[in-house]
Amino acid sequence: MTGSRVASLGSIQNFGGYFAGSLSPWLTGVLVTTTGSYLIPFVLGAVVAVIAGIAYLLLLRAPIRVDSAATEIGDTSS
């Protein structure tokens, strides 16, 4: 059950990153064309970075521990 939750969370994170990555050049172009300045896109980028940092600090509870037996099952190096 945990594996499917991890996959779902990873999928949601990747979707958000890809969506923002494809939207940001368009939004930056619109803002620069409209205002004639890069100030607003830079401020928006800074705000997003600060929000992401705060979310990281508040949402990360403890490091995920990896069981050594679990890593040996998928180990094909030997």
Image (cartoon, helix red, strand yellow):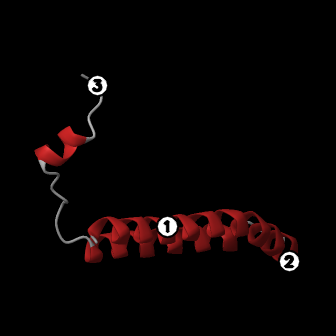
Q: Nearer the viewer, residue 37 or 56?
A: 56
Image position of 40 with respect to 18: above or below: below
Q: Nearer the viewer, residue 74 or 29?
A: 74
Q: Nearer the viewer, mark 3 or mark 1?
A: 3
Q: Earlier in the sequence, mark 2 or mark 1?
A: 1
Where residue 34 sits: x, y (%)?
86, 77
Q: Nearer the viewer, mark 2 or mark 3?
A: 3
Q: Nearer the viewer, residue 75 or 53?
A: 75
Say which element carries label 2.
helix
Q: Earlier in the sequence, mark 3 or mark 1?
A: 1
Task: Measure the C-alpha gap from mark 2 to mark 3.
Answer: 55 Å
Q: Nearer the viewer, mark 2 or mark 1?
A: 1
Q: Residues within 10 Å of mark 1 (few under 14, many from 20)?
A: few
- Specify the quadrant of the image occupied by residue 76: top left
Name the residue tied to disc 2.
34
Task: Measure the C-alpha gap from mark 3 to mark 1.
Answer: 28 Å
Instruction: Say which residue appears at 22% left-offset and 41% top-offset.
Output: 73
Instruction: Say which residue appears at 19% left-offset and 59% top-offset.
Output: 64
Name the residue tied to disc 3.
77
Task: Measure the C-alpha gap from mark 2 to mark 1.
Answer: 34 Å
- Specify the quadrant of the image occupied by residue 50: bottom left
- Amino acid type indicated by mark 1: Ser
Where residue 30 sits: x, y (%)?
83, 73
Name the residue tied to disc 1.
11
- Amino acid type indicated by mark 2: Thr
